[in-house]
Image: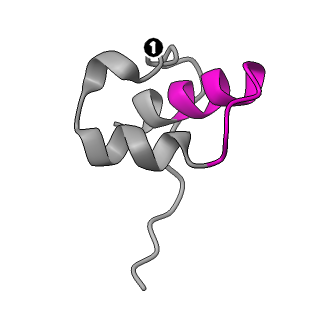
Amino acid sequence: MVRALAGTILKAALNNESPGLLQKILDDKDRKSAGEALPAKGLFLYKVRYL
């Protein structure tokens, strides 16, 4: 999940997409509109904060 989210954020940043794109993808619950998952090389979940 972290790799997919990071890939989608990177795709949005590189394509100068609107800030609401990530929220729209999450609301649509459609994995096809998200970016590719990043490779697992060095990418890990560091911390989870519950608010």
Q: Position of residue 24 (x, y in %)?
A: 41, 44
Q: Position of residue 2 (x, y in %)?
A: 43, 38
In the picture as drawn, the residue positioned furthest to the bottom comes out as 51
Q: Is residue 17 on the magenta stretch?
A: yes
Q: Position of residue 50 (x, y in %)?
A: 39, 79
Residue under the image location 41 percent in, 24 percent down: 34
In the rendered structure, the answer to whether residue 8 lies left or right of residue 26 reads: right
* Residue type for callout 1: Glu
Q: Quadrant of residue 1?
A: top left
* Mark 1 neighbour class, 10 Å CA radius: few under 14, some 14 to 19, many 20 or more: some
Tell me the chief SS of the magenta region: helix
Residue under the image location 51 percent in, 13 percent down: 39
Q: Quadrant of residue 25?
A: top left
Q: Quadrant of residue 28?
A: top left
Q: Is residue 41 on the magenta stretch?
A: no
Q: Name the one closer to the observer, 31 or 18.
A: 18
In the picture as drawn, the residue positioned furthest to the left comes out as 29
Task: Decide: is 5 above or below 39.
Answer: below
Residue under the image location 44 percent in, 66 percent down: 48
Task: Decide: is 51 above or below 49.
Answer: below
Q: Secondary structure at mark 1?
A: loop
Query: Range of the magenta residues?
Result: 6-19
Quadrant in which the C terminus appears: bottom left
Q: Which residue is mark 1?
A: 36
Q: How is the image coloured?
A: one colour
